[in-house]
């Protein structure tokens, strides 16, 4: 590792504002990381220049010995790397909007459109070829490094790395179950604490919270506190939110009706869903296909323009730091840690903290296959993640999990092999598909509209397949 056992961390897609700013925060903040190196990689020269300047300003302000590197080509940054975080996405807001609008035309409603349904399949088609190219360069240029996928669909990409690039050490992440924050959130909903400042190690040890499932389709399999099952109390708290919107008060497509849906799914399956903003997109109940109206309307569609506004606001924050409108001294109090760099710190420092990681099951969920790619609480160090036992997945949920796993595995295989027939099979296996003709129409339209972002072979194979 760089500089007396402190690591070199490469962030590919440093212009990803949902990760880049927090990565800088953690790399500067952590004594286990802040004498190493942070290499920022982005193909957009303007964004790369801004993130590099921001990182240098934070380093200068805090006085740490962190070395900052910037590169437009990941091959220039990979030599000497100990960790490589993949967080890139090419014009993803626009393409997700296209995915969702075309899918809605044929009766498939997606509020996020990047992990399940046609949106998940097409995002993998756009991103996974680059991921596999990058991993090939990791194998060649820094073969001992850990490759950490932070790009949706996280399970699809994580499966592809595990199955088709086994020589590279890898796992996949999603920030929806960032520890300890997710556990504290449910402790508050359960009434165990009123404020997160009340949280302590004793309460943490007494609250047995076990979550498992495919990424974005995860459920609470246990929530015991001092011998009492806390799931009914958590569901009751969700039920109190009669406004039918996210607890943070947002009204975006991903936030609408989340508490009501969480309670409703608990009443059916006996397990609280813990990533409802995505989980509601994985099930057929909110697609609007029923004959009778329900109290929860069909999913709202991904809101493209508000997401652009959010990105603009985040870049404005960066610009304000660089220009001095916001003093750089406020950086460390305005931002906070990120899931990936939290885990890297834990691995390097041997801190012994558990984290939710997308990896192979290996017996953690007793009634699912050892190689099922699930999001599980893991102990993790430089040897990699080791899932903690969870118990069995309840019937009903287990069957739905298996369909999602098959969809994701077919998607990964289709994209890696460039096989249109497998891609079509993935679409027909997907739980949101309701019609063969409609699914074929979605494939044709999205292939036509996204040609500039997809490999040419899809068009040759698609013509041959019909």
Image (tube, grey):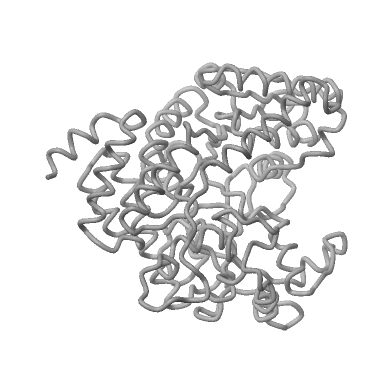
Q: Quadrant of residue 97?
A: top left
The answer to whether 372 appears left or right of 4 in the picture is: left
Residue situated in front as seen by the camera: 255 or 40: 255
Q: Residue at x 52, y 52 (%)?
A: 358
Furthest residue toward bottom: 228
Q: Position of residue 325 (x, y in %)?
A: 83, 25
Q: Position of residue 449 (x, y in %)?
A: 32, 36
The answer to whether 407 appears left or right of 280 in the picture is: left
Q: Position of residue 36 (x, y in %)?
A: 72, 26
Q: Residue at x 38, y 36 (%)?
A: 126
The answer to whether 196 appears left or right of 280 in the picture is: right
Residue situated in front as seen by the camera: 23 or 140: 23
Q: Is residue 329 above or below residue 259?
A: above
The answer to whether 262 appears left or right of 319 in the picture is: left
Q: Quadrant of residue 47?
A: top right
Q: Residue at x 67, y 20 (%)?
A: 50
Image quarter where the N terminus lies is: top right
Q: Position of residue 130 (x, y in %)?
A: 41, 31
Residue situated in front as seen by the camera: 160 or 99: 99
Q: Residue at x 74, y 41 (%)?
A: 349
Image quarter where the C terminus lies is: top left
Q: How many marks?
A: 0
């Amino acid at each position: 590792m760089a500089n007396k056992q402190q690591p070199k961390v490469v962030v590919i897609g440093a212009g990803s504002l949902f990760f880049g700013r927090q990565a800088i925060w953690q790399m500067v903040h952590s004594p286990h990381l802040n004498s190493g190196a942070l290499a920022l990689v982005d193909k957009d020269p303007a964004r790369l220049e801004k993130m590099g300047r921001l990182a240098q300003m934070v380093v200068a302000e805090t006085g740490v010995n962190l070395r900052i590197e910037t590169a437009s080509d990941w091959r220039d940054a990979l030599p000497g790397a100990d960790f490589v975080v993949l967080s890139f996405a090419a014009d993803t807001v626009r393409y997700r909007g296209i995915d969702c609008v075309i899918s809605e035309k044929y009766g498939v409603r997606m509020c996020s459109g990047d992990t399940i349904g046609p949106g998940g399949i097409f995002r993998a088609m756009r991103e996974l070829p680059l991921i596999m190219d990058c991993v090939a360069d990791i194998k060649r240029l820094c073969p001992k490094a850990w490759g950490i996928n932070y790009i949706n669909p996280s399970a699809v990409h994580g499966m592809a790395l595990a199955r088709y690039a086994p020589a590279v050490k890898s796992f996949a992440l999603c920030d929806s179950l960032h520890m300890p924050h997710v556990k504290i959130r449910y402790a508050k909903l359960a009434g165990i604490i009123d404020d997160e400042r009340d949280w302590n190690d004793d309460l943490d040890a007494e609250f047995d919270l076990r979550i498992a499932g495919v990424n974005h389709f995860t459920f609470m399999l246990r929530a015991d506190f001092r011998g009492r099952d806390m799931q009914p109390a958590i569901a009751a708290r969700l039920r109190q939110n009669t406004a039918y919107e996210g607890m943070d008060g947002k009204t975006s497509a991903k936030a609408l009706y989340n508490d009501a849906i969480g309670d409703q799914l608990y009443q059916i399956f006996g397990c609280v869903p813990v990533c409802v903003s995505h989980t509601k997109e994985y099930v057929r109940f909110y697609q609007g296909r029923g004959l009778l109206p329900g109290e929860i309307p069909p999913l709202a569609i991904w809101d493209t323009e508000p997401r652009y506004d959010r990105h603009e606001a985040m870049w404005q924050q960066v610009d304000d730091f660089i220009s001095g409108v916001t003093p750089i001294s406020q950086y460390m109090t305005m931002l906070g840690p990120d899931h990936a760099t939290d885990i890297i710190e834990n691995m390097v420092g041997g801190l012994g903290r558990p984290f939710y990681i997308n990896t192979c099951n290996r017996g953690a969920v007793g009634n699912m296959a050892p190689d099922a790619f699930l999001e599980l609480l893991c102990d993790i160090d430089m040897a990699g993640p080791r899932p903690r036992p969870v118990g069995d997945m309840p019937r009903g949920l287990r069957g739905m999990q298996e369909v999602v796993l098959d969809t994701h595995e077919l998607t990964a295989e289709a994209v890696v092999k460039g096989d249109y027939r497998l891609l079509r099979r993935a679409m027909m296996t997907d739980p949101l598909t309701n019609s063969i003709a409609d699914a074929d129409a979605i494939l044709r339209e999205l292939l036509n509209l996204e040609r500039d972002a997809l490999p040419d072979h899809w068009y040759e194979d698609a013509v041959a397949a019909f």
